[in-house]
Amino acid sequence: MCSVPSSFVLVYHRSPFDEVIDAQGQRHWQDQKSPNGIIPTLRNLFRSQPSGTWIAWRENESADAEDETLTVDTGNDSSSPPIRLRRIPLRKEQIGSFYHVTSKEAIWPVLHSFPSLFEVNNADWATFQEVNRRFAEAACNEAAPGASIWIHDYNLWLTPGYIRALRPDVKISLFHHTPFPSSDVFSILPWREEILESLLCCDAVGFHIPRYAENFARAASSLLAVEKGPKTSVAPHFLPCGSALAQPDATPWLGYRGRRVQLVSTPVGTSPEVILGLRNGDTVQQLISEIEDGTKRGRRLILSASRVDYTKGNQELLLAYERLLERRPDLHGEVVLVLACVAANTGMKVYEDTQRSIEEMVGRINGRFSRIDWVPIRLTTQRIPYEEMVAWFASADVCWITPLRDGLNLVAKEYAAARKGKGGSLVLSEFTGASVVMKGAVLTNPYSHRRMDEAIEAALAMPAEQQISRMESMVQAVERLSVDNWADEQLRAIQAAEPALAS
């Protein structure tokens, strides 16, 4: 047991800061490359906690390595507080099995409703269980009596169950950063009951949107003898009907083995004030000028940004752009698509195949339509520095985001934040969680050629007055549903839980 138990324990495989080893072998900590997103917000939670610990992993090849506990900060007067960090040593082989194989190759396609890509032989469930157990034991060793433990994401699905068995006194919450699929798709997983039993050991389970929470409730009621609370209408900032992920009402809680589990829907947000501050700063303004003089040159700029992943719909978007150029020769030389598609670094064949397909399609389309003074697509697979990304958002006349499935999609929200006070059009897949809160977006169905074609045409033809009105609506949503709002609402749910009792 640690010498100073923590009243708040955050369990996330990612560390709060990036570790850097210099040429002299000295260790330093530095901020994440993006100042936006959840990591800075989660770090800032430690300001308001009387005592807290962050649990993460570290790679270590020693078979008898022990957990490492230290206090970390960047040492450069960062606005983030020093954080007590406990790191679990995992061998490279364990990380590969737990994260890249079982989590990404076996579970990820089911979460994103691609059951045909699920292969049970890709999974090493015993290692997945062991790593989850290690996280749970570390959290229990850090937690004070009655502490709150907040766990993040599906790769730690089993951690709540192990914690509850060891520490019935603590409060437990888990937030899903991914979609939660429909109950029939979820049931493909051979470990479905074990997963649900663990999640139902929580006091609260968090999701981006009500549809995911309802999918979870249906899966639990289909497979286990749970009690379901009477449905309530969703909050007014959610779209209640009219698109693929809209949901008019949802189950607020589940009862199981004497425990009431709250189901809390709060979409992760951005830090709009950070984005706006960057946009208005000298560095980004200079980058905007360079984009205007270089890539745009009076053309309309269409921007799409994502990772190389079969869920992101990049191939479908490229085919729609090719059809646009076929239909609209008047747009040749008048539009340019910038596709920022960050390559995966896992060595997974499915991602390598996806990247190869994207590069081949871009080459074909550019080969068909390029002129001496115009290339229709600019592709980069390198990670773009965040300030430069804000400049691209601020410069883009259209942001085209059409994943086949996405838990939320922060790019859509970042685009709106960077366009505050301006026009611009957002074309957004209705299969993203963001689609039910970004009510000014042009929603589209990436599985339908006709819908994709209509959406990009509508975005390009949208009058300036309508652009400004729609963008104002989206900016209001982004500002209301900020990343700080997400953290506050999720933490309130776990803090409001009744004191935990032994099962």
Image (cartoon, rainbow, N blue to C red):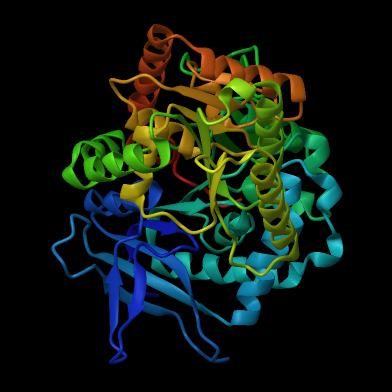
Residue at the location (54% across, 43% down)?
372
Q: Is residue 246 above or below residue 486?
A: above
Residue situated furthest front in the rendering: 372
Q: Is residue 144 above or below residue 224?
A: below
Residue 119 locus on image (x, y percent): 85, 59
In this rendering, position of residue 92 left or right of residue 1: right
Q: Is residue 406 above or below residue 20?
A: above
Location of residue 282 by image quarter = top left
Q: Is residue 21 above or below residue 450?
A: below
Location of residue 418 by image quarter = top left
Residue at the location (55% across, 25% down)?
427
In this rendering, position of residue 27 left or right of residue 178: left
Which one is nearer the viewer's eye here, 69 or 123?
Answer: 123
Residue 170 locus on image (x, y percent): 46, 53
Quarter of the image with the N terminus is bottom left
In this rendering, position of residue 183 left or right of residue 376: right
Residue at the location (49% across, 16% down)?
439
Residue 84 can be seen in this image: yes
Q: How many marks?
A: 0
Residue at the location (39% across, 11% down)?
464
In this rendering, position of residue 338 left or right of residue 351: left
Residue situated furthest left in the rendering: 77
Location of residue 250 by image quarter = top right
Which one is nearer the viewer's eye here, 496 or 432?
Answer: 432
Which one is nearer the viewer's eye here, 158 or 482?
Answer: 482
Residue 80 locus on image (x, y percent): 22, 56
Residue 172 locus on image (x, y percent): 49, 49
Which one is nearer the viewer's eye here, 362 or 197?
Answer: 362
Residue 41 can be seen in this image: no
